[in-house]
Amino acid sequence: MKEDSKRMHSPCLEEASQVCLHGCCPSPFLTSHDPQTRPSKPTNTSAACRRDFASKTTSSIFPDTQFTNHESLPSMHESFAEFTEAYPQYSDTGRVDQIRAQEYYHLSFSNHTCLDYLGTGLFSYSQLQKHESPAYRIASSSFPLPPQSPPPVLDIPFFGVTYRTGNLKTLLLHGGAASELESAVRTRIMSFLNVSENDYSMVFTANKTSAFKLVAESYPFQSNRKLLSVYDYESEAIEAMTNSSEKKGARVMSAEFSWPRLRIQSSKLRNMLVSKEKKKKMKKRSGLFAFPLHSRMTGARYPYLWLSIAEENGWHVLIDACALGPKDMDSFGLSLFRPDFLICSFYKVFGENPSGFACLFVKKSTIPILETSTTSGIVGLIPTENLFQAATESPGTDTEVENIASQSGRIEKGKTTYEIQHAQVAEKLKGLEMIEVSESDKAIEIIQEDNLKQKGEIECRGLDQVDSLGLVTISNRARCLINWLVSALLKLQHPNTKGTPLVRIYGPKVKFDRGPAIAFNVFDWKGEKIEPVLVQKLADRSNISLSYGFLHHIWFADKYQEEKEKVMERRSNETKSANGNKGKDKNDMGIAVVTAALGFLANFQDIYKLWAFIAQFLDADFVEKERWRYTCLNQKTIEVL
């Protein structure tokens, strides 16, 4: 066990200590907004680093300038020159641009800006193209030149998934039948996350929601009656966990977030976490504490100290790592804190294939407390040849056919195809007739040979690229991009008004340690909010993928009560459907927002393109025309009897 701890401690924590300008900033374990907690005082160097970064951003990004016309924006070339002057450290991340150009060149061909991806991509786009006909093969070298035009996609997925119904506890204790591919992917992911097989067991799940529901259905809420979560946004996964836990008699609680910065209400969360029996020897656990390391919508990062407080007070801890950056788990350090449950998600190819799976890790010492229950949502990974065989031989059930269909979804001409009907699956398989059957068989063999480098190993080039870049490079790049975007958006102001801003940002603004996500709304010249769903649809039309969601559990002090009446709204049906909420409307009040998330491949062109798109809303005629069009397209016909 000691050897495992040493292995997990190095070299990730060494690198993590360098993220904050090479060690000048304290660990998240030592930072807290809780006034009752008095950790060691940060060094002057640490405080100076953070202040310098914020002040440099404020003073360097369009100083003393407000943009009131979208046509007056500086060009991307001019903006980038100012950007690199403000953030000279960005030039050290050029390796990311090389990877994007050589491995994900479809983004340039399609001019598609992907700002809606969470999780980590397993494979690169060039891996997909590697299995094309020889005419479209890319020459093998350290930095191969991409083709001059996008080659046709053969549409052979790297793997498929098949649903399994079984007992989670039994699978965690004894495992189950797994293909060589599945075992190889499991080993690679555990290595990527620096998780020891001696400490954790893992199952694949269909998605994040399935993983949360599996935990709720197996956790002993009859004895450990509380479920406490820390989410400032509506989450389908948390909704599923809440519904399942309430059926088992759990008492559901949630942290609240103070307006306007949306920081955790520390005193309330501490009161919910701290056990009254703290000074006594606790005979049983308090319950389950679900904690995301940061908000996937606002980008707010939460002090890891809450995990220690929860553990000290008898809580089982579930960490939601789905919204973390590709190497953020290195800064967490599983050698310092080992949660009882850990959930993360992966997709196939960034900007091309959003399908994938989630991983549920359970600490081996926690498995015995789980209850025996027959659950769904666990999946297995199917090798490519098995997927095609299953598709051509008809699996026999609608569920399995739909599951196979979902594996073929991909982005074409800037549009995302997430679901394919049975007939379309057949058509796609028929599409392989562009080459002879023998050649398609050969292509499938190539996939298996190339991706399974040797027995027990698989080439996940997306993970390899992230590992090669490291935590420092990825974090510094994201920090520069997201803070420039925040600053630039706040520079947009309506003309002929008394300083009416175009954009309102929720949560942290310019901040050294904010996450690479942003939640915002766009307002017209009268101060009325433009519907987030309309902003998202117009962005999609401009080849920019955004998301929208719903912030909730917001706490307002007395001095903000008047503002509360203006900003809080009842959740719309569209927001419910976007988040998959079909349950009881217990938390209908909140704020619908537009969200953007930067992956590790994001570049300056992506954020400039988003900024220029949002600036169009400064044109009142543009706003009114699009609102009218949106209203007409979404009118409902009412039959009068």
Image: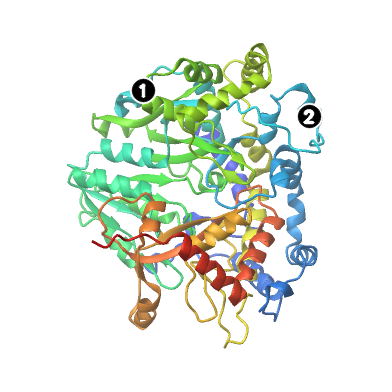
Decide if residue 119 is in sight here.
yes
For label 2, the SS is: loop
Query: In front here: 520 or 6?
Result: 520
Q: Mark 2 against mark 1, which lies toward the viewer?
A: 1
The location of residue 212, given as percent across then percent down, is 35, 41
For label 1, the SS is: loop
Decide if residue 39 is in sight here.
no
Single out the residue that lies furthest toward the top. Answer: 438
Numbered-mark total: 2
Up the image or down, 244 lies above or below 301; here it is: above
Label 1 CA crowd tier, 10 Å (few <14, some 14–19, many 20+) = few
Q: Amino acid at mark 1?
A: Thr
Query: In front here: 239 or 269?
Result: 239
Label 2 CA crowd tier, 10 Å (few <14, some 14–19, many 20+) = some
Label 1, on which residue? 397
Q: Earlier in the sequence, mark 2 or mark 1?
A: 2
Residue 138 - label: 2
Query: In front here: 265 or 33?
Result: 265
Looking at the rendered image, the quarter that the C terminus falls into is bottom left
Q: Amino acid at mark 2?
A: Ile
Looking at the rendered image, the quarter that the N terminus falls into is top left
